[in-house]
C-alpha cells in the first residue's frame, strides 16, 4: 500500500477529488466484519492469525526494547526473591538472648549435653544488675531476664514487642523448670509430649517465599502491562488506526493476553530455576506442574484489572497511579510478603475476596505442600470467573479514542 493510500485510509474525509482519482478505489468493507467485500470465508482465519501474530510480535519487541519495563517486570521481582531468600536462608527456631541475674538454680543445673542443647536456642548472659538488664529488654537489646525469686520461684521478664521470641523464651524456660521439678521429685512424668512439625525437617523459608513473591510478580506484570499499554496506545492514536484497519478487537486483546501470559510464564520459570538452586533449596512437591495453568488463569484475571484501570484512566500517569493503588494493597493483604493469620478478622475477610490471595494459597499448595488438582481447579475456575466479570465491566468504559 502506498503512503498516499495509507494516509487516505487512516484519515478518512481529508483527501480531495484529485486524490480520489489518482488512487484506486478501495474495496468496500462489510458492515459486520470490516473486511473487503467479496473476501472468501476461508481467508478470514488466515487474516486473523496474521493480525494476531503481527500484533504479538510488535508487543514483544516493544517490551524487550523498553529496559525499564523489562527491569520492573522480570528483574525487580527476582531481586525480592534473592533478597528475602538470602536474609531468611538460615532462619529456623527463633534464637533468643537472655540475661541471667545472679544464681538461677534450674539453669545452672543444666550441664553437659543438656547445656549444649539449651545454648542452641538461648544465649545466656550472666549479670548482677537486674535494673540494667530490664532496661536492655525494654530497648530490645535483650529478649528476656531470668532471676531466682523466693521459695524457688523463677521470675521471667520479657518484652511483648516480639511475640514470637517472647513465646519461644517462655516455652524453653517452662520446659527447663518442668524438668527440674521432675528431677527434684524423682518420679517420672505421668504424660510426655512429643512435638514435631508436619512439614519435612529440611523445610526452608524459600518454600513459603517463592509462591507469594511469584504471585505478586505475575499480578504486577499483568495489571501494569494491560493498563499502560491501553492508555499509551489510545494517546498515540494506535487504537484509532487499529480500529480502521482490518483487525478485530478480539485479535488485539488476544495478542496482548498472549504476551502477558508469555511474560508470566517466563517469570515463573526464572523464579523456579533460581529458588531450586542448591543455595536456596526450594523442594517442589506434589503436582507442582499445575503452577503453569494457575499462572495462565491468574494472568487472565489480573489483566482484566489492568483493562479496567486503562479504560478509566486518561493518561499514563493516571493509569500507573490506579494500578499502584490496586496492586500494592492487594499484595500486602493477600499474604505475598507475610501471612495474614494474625490480622484482624475484618482484614482477613477482605483478603479472602482478593484473587491474589487465592493464587498464593493454591500456588503454595501445589508447589510446596503436596497439593494436586483438587487444590488448583477451584482457584482456576474462580480466577476465570473474576476475569469474565471484570472484563464485562471494563468493556462498558472502553474507548478507542480520547474523548
Image (tube, rainbow, N blue to C red):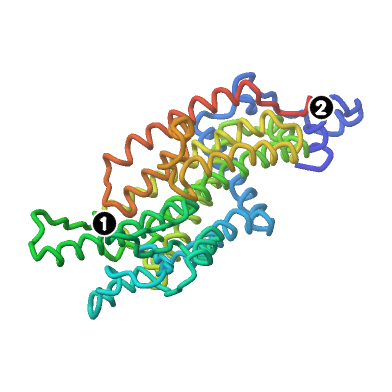
Furthest residue to the front?
150
Q: Quadrant of residue 249?
A: top right
Residue 214: tell me if it is visible. no
Where is residue 152? Give x, y as percent.
27, 61
Q: Quadrant of residue 120?
A: bottom left
Q: Residue at x 29, y 74 (%)?
A: 108
Q: Earlier in the sequence, mark 2 or mark 1?
A: 2
Calculate the distance from the C-alpha at mark 2 to the C-alpha at mark 1.
67 Å
Given residues 107 and 403, the one toward you in this image is: 107
Determine the secondary structure under disc 2: loop
Where is residue 59? Give x, y as percent.
63, 48
- State which quarter of the image contains the N terminus: top right
Given residues 141 and 148, the one toward you in this image is: 148
Q: Residue at x 20, y 65 (%)?
A: 180
Residue 69, above or below 108: above
Q: Residue at x 50, y 55 (%)?
A: 267
Where is residue 37? Give x, y as percent.
63, 24
Number of marks in picture: 2
Q: Which mark is residue 199?
A: 1
Crowding at dot 1, Cα within 10 Å, few <14 / some 14-19 / many 20+, comes out as few
Residue 127, above or below 228: below
Crowding at dot 2, Cα within 10 Å, few <14 / some 14-19 / many 20+, comes out as few
Left or right of residue 353: residue 307: right
- State which quarter of the image contains the C terminus: top right
Where is residue 168? Give x, y as percent.
35, 58
Residue 28: tell me if it is visible. yes
Determine the secondary structure under disc 1: loop
Q: Which mark is residue 12?
A: 2
Left or right of residue 396: residue 81: left
Left or right of residue 270: residue 116: left
Amino acid at each position: 500500500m502506498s503512503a498516499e493510500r495509507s494516509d487516505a485510509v487512516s484519515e478518512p474525509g481529508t483527501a480531495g477529488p484529485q486524490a480520489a482519482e489518482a488512487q484506486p478505489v478501495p474495496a468496500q468493507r462489510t458492515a459486520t466484519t470490516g473486511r473487503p467485500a467479496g473476501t472468501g470465508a476461508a481467508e478470514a482465519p488466515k487474516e486473523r492469525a496474521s493480525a494476531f501474530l503481527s500484533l504479538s510480535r510488535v508487543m514483544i519487541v516493544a517490551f524487550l526494547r523498553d529496559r525499564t519495563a523489562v527491569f520492573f517486570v522480570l528483574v525487580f521481582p527476582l531481586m525480592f526473591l534473592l533478597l528475602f531468600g538470602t536474609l531468611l536462608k538460615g532462619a529456623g527456631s527463633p534464637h533468643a538472648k537472655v540475661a541471667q541475674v545472679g544464681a538461677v538454680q534450674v539453669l545452672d543445673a543444666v550441664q553437659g549435653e543438656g547445656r549444649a542443647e539449651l545454648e542452641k536456642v538461648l544465649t545466656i548472659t550472666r549479670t548482677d544488675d537486674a535494673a540494667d538488664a530490664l532496661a536492655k529488654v525494654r530497648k530490645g537489646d535483650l529478649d528476656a531476664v531470668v532471676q531466682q525469686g523466693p521459695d524457688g520461684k523463677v521470675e521471667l521478664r520479657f518484652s511483648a514487642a516480639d511475640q514470637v521470641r517472647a513465646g519461644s523464651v517462655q516455652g524453653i524456660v517452662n520446659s527447663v523448670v518442668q524438668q527440674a521439678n521432675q528431677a527434684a521429685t524423682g518420679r517420672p512424668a505421668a504424660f510426655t509430649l512429643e512435638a514435631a512439625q508436619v512439614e519435612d525437617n529440611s523445610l526452608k523459608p524459600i518454600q513459603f517465599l517463592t509462591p507469594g513473591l511469584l504471585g505478586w510478580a505475575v499480578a504486577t506484570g499483568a495489571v501494569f502491562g494491560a493498563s499502560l499499554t491501553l492508555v499509551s496506545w489510545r494517546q498515540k492514536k494506535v487504537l484509532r488506526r487499529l480500529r480502521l484497519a482490518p483487525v478485530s478487537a478480539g485479535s488485539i486483546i488476544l495478542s496482548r493476553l498472549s504476551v502477558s501470559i508469555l511474560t508470566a510464564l517466563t517469570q515463573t520459570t526464572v523464579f523456579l530455576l533460581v529458588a531450586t538452586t542448591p543455595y536456596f533449596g526450594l523442594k517442589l512437591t506434589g503436582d507442582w506442574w499445575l503452577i503453569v495453568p494457575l499462572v495462565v488463569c491468574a494472568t487472565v484475571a489480573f489483566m482484566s484489572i489492568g483493562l479496567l484501570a486503562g479504560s478509566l484512566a486518561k493518561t499514563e500517569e493516571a493509569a500507573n497511579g490506579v494500578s499502584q493503588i490496586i496492586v500494592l494493597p492487594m499484595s500486602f493483604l493477600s499474604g505475598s510478603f507475610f501471612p495474614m493469620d494474625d490480622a484482624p478478622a475484618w482484614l482477613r475477610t477482605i483478603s479472602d475476596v482478593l484473587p491474589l490471595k487465592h493464587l498464593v494459597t493454591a500456588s503454595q499448595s501445589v508447589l510446596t505442600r503436596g497439593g494436586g488438582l483438587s487444590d488448583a481447579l477451584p482457584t482456576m475456575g474462580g480466577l476465570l470467573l473474576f476475569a469474565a466479570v471484570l472484563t464485562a465491566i471494563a468493556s462498558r468504559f472502553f474507548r478507542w479514542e480520547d474523548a
